[in-house]
Image: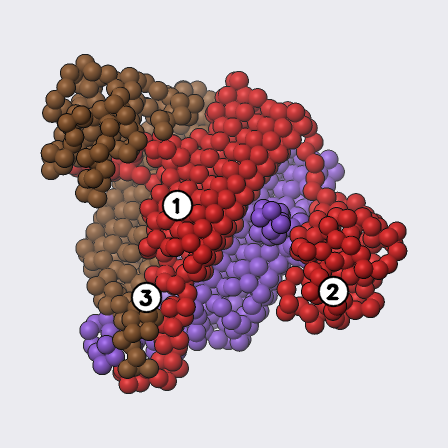
Chain colours: A brown, B red, C purple
Amino acid sequence: MPADRRFHPYAGPQTLAAIAAAAGGRAAAGDPERRFEGVAPLAEAGVAEVSFIGERRYLDTLRATAAGAVIVSPNFAAAVPASSIAVVTEAAQLGFGRVAALFHPAPHPRPGVHPTAVLGEGATVGDGTEIGAYAVIGDGARIGRNCVIHPHAVVGPGVEVGDDCRLHTHSSVSHAVLGRGVVLHPGARVGQEGFGFAPTVEGRFETMPQLGRVVLGDAAEIGANSCVDRGAQGDTVLGPGTRLDNLVQVGHNVRTGQGCILVAQSGISGSAVLGDFVTVAGQAGVAGHLRIGAKARIGAQSGVTNDVPASTDMLGSPAWPVRETWRAIAHLRRIARGGGGGKAD
Amino acid sequence: MPADRRFHPYAGPQTLAAIAAAAGGRAAAGDPERRFEGVAPLAEAGVAEVSFIGERRYLDTLRATAAGAVIVSPNFAAAVPASSIAVVTEAAQLGFGRVAALFHPAPHPRPGVHPTAVLGEGATVGDGTEIGAYAVIGDGARIGRNCVIHPHAVVGPGVEVGDDCRLHTHSSVSHAVLGRGVVLHPGARVGQEGFGFAPTVEGRFETMPQLGRVVLGDAAEIGANSCVDRGAQGDTVLGPGTRLDNLVQVGHNVRTGQGCILVAQSGISGSAVLGDFVTVAGQAGVAGHLRIGAKARIGAQSGVTNDVPASTDMLGSPAWPVRETWRAIAHLRRIARGGGGGKAD
Amino acid sequence: MPADRRFHPYAGPQTLAAIAAAAGGRAAAGDPERRFEGVAPLAEAGVAEVSFIGERRYLDTLRATAAGAVIVSPNFAAAVPASSIAVVTEAAQLGFGRVAALFHPAPHPRPGVHPTAVLGEGATVGDGTEIGAYAVIGDGARIGRNCVIHPHAVVGPGVEVGDDCRLHTHSSVSHAVLGRGVVLHPGARVGQEGFGFAPTVEGRFETMPQLGRVVLGDAAEIGANSCVDRGAQGDTVLGPGTRLDNLVQVGHNVRTGQGCILVAQSGISGSAVLGDFVTVAGQAGVAGHLRIGAKARIGAQSGVTNDVPASTDMLGSPAWPVRETWRAIAHLRRIARGGGGGKAD
């Protein structure tokens, strides 16, 4: 099914030459002026459409595709059928994304401030920035250039937002400094008070002042309805390019390196430190004050209760190295099936 | 405790005849003109109130109830005490719900557009629809008849909303087509960008254009602060009558059949396909690209990592058929209690 | 790093006498008029700053601190280095929080109603209350004194909000009665319809009217993007001082005692009852209709499927008493490491 042009404005058709250039590749054959109408998955694409292959398991689909052109890495080029043009590039998925954006470019900001937006005293807005209906920008906040502040987004007093940021509908940010190209998806919550309190002698809880900030590196993205609390003392910091999926929790004073990936509904407890390129899969949790080494990968629904060395894959609740956890699972699997655990019972 | 009439406006008293009609049943005794004042749980209801029994475990409560009337299925009718009138129907819970709505009807839309609402260029609003304060309707969006768009709800450009929909406070929807009678509860997020990106050769992540939509079938409901991402290519589709509880995550290109139930904090990863009437219990997760057969039931906190046949109950992380998982749990339970696992230790 | 004064306005310097008074303690030495500039963690504080020690594991850090003063409980006082003044109090963390608030006091309400706020018919607002931009207060709602209703917060018709409450940005509340000092953090959802429906004979689901309310005790706090559904019949009740972290789910008709703590991404299913001072750790779940005794502690990612006695620590999915669960985990750990489970395999 082609993209619905009501939602994804169309900038096609595009020539094979433009497509190959966008993909960062070269066409193995074909007229550079041949025109294509859009992009589609391998199984659905027709002769006027461009597709791609990202993983080996789709090789059979590739061999049967009717796509007019396919973006492929060199090792898959030989599998492209004769009816299709191979556009060969070292990074096929990335190249395909850029071709898709050629046909359906992301909307540009429409510079200007909607008449219903409220700009606080001393707030500044950079050139080329669009501020939507009912957005509220607090006193002294600074919004960079070429940003889009979508309707109903709220930026607290004093917040700094870098250039090229997107703050989507109903997102809120306070007590924070955002780098360049940061994206807050709808309903994202950044900079609110962390979960810190102390008991009184009467047994009540009293909130500990949360005196830090949130610092989001360039190109960090916070998913829909995800939450990043500000630091209690010092800052909560997400490194450049770190991406949070939806409904992710990041507690106060967490620090991540660059390029970390936190999948939906995962949670990082307060003061945990993640190195560069750590991946935390869906619904997993990391306990407070832990250190997770660079390139570690935490499996879905895992519960990490100890520090994790770099480049280590962890799984389970509590989480152990994945090979060990699979051994325990295999043992239980035999018992579950009424098999080899019998002697133990 | 009777319903607080500030929040649930009152349309009583009601006659036994009206109550029996609403319940789709018949009163086993009593004056059809006898008047009742409201509804209440079995243990709390008095002589002027109507109650119901839904499950066998409440039979003793039924026998002791002071309710003036009780809605029951035929098999429980004999247990209704002599002081109470049995209203017999094949679907007691449903009947009770309709009687409750007789006393406290859901509010009707108050047609009109609040002066603070913003309607984009070319946006259309059907007859009988209410648009609340500070709602924002994007350019070219189409809102059906008899809808309520609550204060601060945001409908993106081009979105189609069917008749009789309710978009609650702070909900947002973009890139989407909604059927009839769809409900977005407060803070629900529908149609935002999915979690898709590709690494560049420099190690940065680049967003893959998310060129699909969300299609919500008739009477689909999205719980408070739940998220449904739009498709990457093609659509994310929730079938008619599918209901999401609060804080549920649905990734891009998920497809469900009709009448699926996703309980609070559960998550369905991208491109998973659920058949009709699948139930996913609280905090459970389904991995990407899986197929879950019709009427399968996934237990709370389960992690589904493989396809599931129709009508199969699964439990555990990783999830296995529930009978097998219980065997593994029973084994561990003995060890936990210091019992039968001894030989293995 | 000292607090960023753009976000945390500064009320220093403060004298040692004022600091000791705020901490509820006494300075073991030093000139009462000596001035301090702020607060900082032990490892970072300098001679003009005040720090504290909360846990024994930081004793070595305390011995090496350069802080000018340290708030300590009596048992740690001897470990404060000679270069530093010990401020001795029975509750060091609490005392430190109060000292931090002395330097960076929480902002006071700025009384008044923003011109863009919408007040419904018959809504009342107490003295000293601040109502922010685009806040919407429903018909007949009653807001107490000295509250802050932040921008874009929505209060439904008839809702009662006690004195000294804070309703943060994008929070919403309907069908509810809030005590004194209640805090709704950004995006919190209170009072929406619970997840209740009944099947029709045609296999559709029909919503059961949710005729109850939410009652929040004094000083209850609801974290960012957390959800508390109103009761189906009767109320959902959170006792005084109960605190929810972010992304927590509380189903209809849940009741908690005072001082319960629900950590991020935990969920309490409908009609469960929690005694006083129950703690539910991150990502844990409690099934419906259970009773959790006072001071019970539910470990992270646990799944509670049975009633829990008072003062009992539970762990695991399904949850067992923590000592038993650890025995099962130890058994699996040996197998995972290729050890003692061998005989069973």
Same chain? Circles 1 and 3: no
**Please, which chain is the residue tagged with disc 1 on?**
B
Residue of label 2: B77
Residue type at mark 3 is Pro
**Secondary element at tag 2:** helix
Query: Is residue C219 toward the left or the right of residue B211 in the image?
Result: right
Look at the picture and state if C318 lies above or below C15: below
Q: Nearer the viewer, residue A31 or C9?
A: A31
Mark number, residue B114: none
Residue type at mark 1 is Val
Query: Is residue A269 toward the left or the right of residue B104 in the image?
Result: left
Query: Which is closer to the viewer, label 2 or label 3?
Result: 2
Residue of label 1: B273
Residue B20 x %, y %: 78, 52
Same chain? Circles 2 and 3: no
Q: Residue at x 64, y 67 (%)?
A: B56
Look at the picture and state if B250 lies above or below C80: above
**Please, which chain is the residue tagged with disc 2 on?**
B
Residue type at mark 2 is Ala
Residue C344 x %, y %: 25, 79
Placement of the N terminus of chain A among the 4 image quadrants:
top left
Query: Is residue C299 toward the left or the right of residue C43 in the image?
Result: right
**Please, which chain is the residue tagged with disc 3 on?**
A
**Residue A21 visible, this angle:** yes
Residue of label 3: A318
Same chain? Circles 2 and 1: yes
Look at the picture and state if C344 lies above or below B123: below
Residue A284 x %, y %: 35, 56
Q: Tell which circle, 2 or 1, labels the residue nearer the N-terminal end.
A: 2
Distance, label 1 to label 3, CA atoms, is: 29 Å
Q: Nearer the viewer, residue A102 or C83?
A: A102
